[in-house]
Image: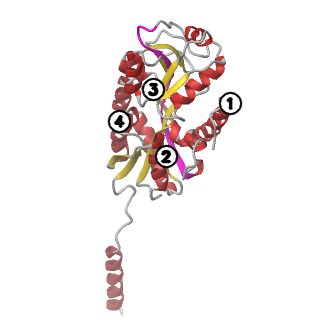
Amino acid sequence: MKHLFRTIAGISTALMLAVPAAAEYPDQPIKVMVPYGAGGSTDTSGRIFIEAMKKALGAELFAVNVTGAGGTVGAAQAASENADGYSIFYTPIAPVTVQPHLRNLSYGEEDFTPICGLIQNPLAVMVAPDSPYQTVQDLVDAARAGEEIVAVGTAPGSIPHITQAALANAYDITFKYVPVGGGPKQAAEILSGRATISTDILPTATLFGLRALAVISDERVDGFDVPTMAELGVDVPTKHWFGVFAPAGTPEDAVAKLADACEVAAADPELVEKLGGMNFAVRFRDRAEFTEFYASEFQGNRDLLKLIGIELE
């Protein structure tokens, strides 16, 4: 009988050893969807984030650029990825809080699970270094006198687009908006004299030699001796931020681990130094704060679009 018990115990032990232990997440590479092309600000900052996340998570991550339609092609694909924790989405504000109000898209607010906020950049009103306009009021006076002020930026519905519209609305004037593309293309138009202003992220001024007249920020920015729009008594309620999302339905344990790793990555000295060298401001929002912030931005931008008269579908 004892021999039988020993035999049964041995069989049981062998069976237990034959069952593989459950793999700990993540045990395979994680795809990071990026909704704009290689070399732009989203791609560049996203790749810096990926390197920091590799260290924080102890896993391999890789970028996949999916471009088109103001970031909405990449956003749609990110929303439709398998919700298994092995696909996440690194994006600026517009594809997830502006474009869904402007187009009949396959995704909406409910199709993403917020993980963390990483960057919030000040926006700026920028002109050529030799522009005759020394202040925002100079621009306003010129527009009121009948001069054509040409504003350039990215696709309709982008933050540069709605920012120039919000600025014009605040002063009850009109700018002519021409979508030309990202920072290098905007700068080329302004420096050539074909355009007057850009209302894009402040690093554009540093990177391409433009002159800031004012910043759209909660406070003044070091290295730029210009006022905030709030100091000028004008509310321009636009922001520019980057955040990280997962497809809705991603398992809670994966989302929690990604959120924890994101916090570690945001504090990585190498990430802070590299982004700072590009004049990107790290503004970390943890999962709870970012979830609330995202909901607020989604509704706030819908209201802003109505206010400034950009037609909704």
Residue 230 vs 181, above or below: the answer is above
- Say whether disc 3 or disc 1 marks the residue closer to the N-terminus: 3
- Say whether disc 4 or disc 2 marks the residue closer to the N-terminus: 4
Q: Distance between the residues labelled 4 and 1?
A: 36 Å
Say left or right for 293 vs 213: right
Disc 3: which residue: 281
Q: Give the range drawn in magenta.
A: 111-131
- The number of discs equals 4
Foreground disc of the pair 4, 1: 1
Q: How far apart are marks 4 and 2 (CA)?
A: 17 Å
Amino acid at pointer 1: Leu
Disc 4: which residue: 48
Q: Do the residues labelled 4 and 1 touch (CB within 8 Å)?
A: no
Q: Distance between the residues labelled 3 and 1?
A: 28 Å
x and y percent of residue 148 in the render?
54, 16
Q: Do the residues labelled 3 and 1 touch (CB within 8 Å)?
A: no
Q: Are marks 3 and 2 in contact (CB under 8 Å)?
A: no
Tell me, for residue 245, which label it has, or none: 2
Foreground disc of the pair 2, 1: 1
Q: How far apart are marks 3 and 2 (CA)?
A: 19 Å
Q: Residues within 10 Å of mark 4 (few under 14, many from 20)?
A: some
- Say whether disc 4 or disc 1 marks the residue closer to the N-terminus: 4
- Say whether disc 3 or disc 2 marks the residue closer to the N-terminus: 2
Query: Which secondary structure, mark 3?
Result: loop
Disc 1: which residue: 307
Q: Is residue 127 found inside the magenta-colored segment of the image?
A: yes
Decide which of 26, 239 is in the foreground and name it.
239
Amino acid at pointer 4: Ile
Q: Residues within 10 Å of mark 3 (few under 14, many from 20)?
A: some
Residue 59 vs 243, above or below: the answer is below
